[in-house]
Every structure is written in C-alpha cells, then in structure tokens.
Image (cartoon, helix red, strand yellow):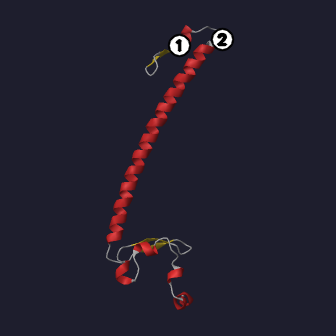
Amino acid sequence: ETNKASSTVIPKPEESIEGNDSTVYHPEDKKLQKRAANRRSAQLSRKRKKQYIEDLKEENADLRRMELILRSIPDLVVSFDSSGKIGFVSQSVSKFLQFTPDELEGKSFWDRLCEDSVKLL
C-alpha cells in the first residue's frame, strides 16, 4: 500500500516476516504503519474541525439574524438572568425609558429601579 502524502510503502502482512502463529512486522514496518495511521487520523481531524467551523458560522449567522429581528421589534423586549443582570434590550427601550440599550445591557436590573420600586417588588 502506498501513502500519497509521502509516497511511503507500507508492507502488507503477507510481505512481512511470519512468526509462530501470528504475523510479525519489522520495527521499521511498524513505524511506517503508525505514521500512516497518524496521517489518516490527522486528516480526519482536519475534516471534522472544518465541518465544525462551518456549522458554527451558520449558527452564528442565524443568531445574528434573530438578534436583528428582536432589536427591531417595536415592543420593549428585555432579557435578564436570575441575578437581575440585563443581557438584552430591544432598541425600543429609548421610547419607553430614558436609556439606550448600551446603557442597560450588562447592568443590574435592580440598580436601575428607584428605592420605592424595589420595595414594591
């Protein structure tokens, strides 16, 4: 068998030295086989990595489209985590409040409420 990448000839078992009941390869033959196996493994790994990157690019493009849709909705859309940190605010926030999305995103929801409002919640 010939490896195209390096033109290395890999002996088949029938071409190798035979031992008692099993085929025995010369140390040189084992090295060649291991190198060929490593090359095949690396090639497969590169293919998987390339596919993974393509999948991530597609997913990222989908998420960007969804974000654009959310940002353009005329209603106020706010997303925050369990601790109250604001993760997303639609562009329409400036119509309802005196803040831009950049001023609110990443900040604590609780810090933006007045003391009386916090007491009511």
Q: Is residue 39 left or right of residue 31?
A: left
Q: Is residue 26 left or right of residue 88?
A: right
Residue at 49% in and 70% down: 106
Residue at 39% in and 50% down: 57
Three-letter code, disc 2: Asp
* Residue that label 2 marks: 21
Q: Position of residue 95 (x, y in %)?
A: 34, 82
Q: Is residue 19 above or below residue 120?
A: above
In the drawing, what numbered circle is on residue 117? none
Q: Position of residue 89 (x, y in %)?
A: 41, 73
**Quarter of the rendering containing residue 68:** bottom left
* Residue that label 1 marks: 12
> In which quadrant will I find the C terminus?
bottom right
Is 22 in front, or is 46? 46
Q: The residue tagged with tag 2: helix, strand or loop?
A: loop
Residue at 66% in and 9% down: 19
Sort mark 1 into few (<14), some (14-19) or many (20+) by Cα contacts within 10 Å. few
Mark whose residue sits in front, 2 or 1: 1
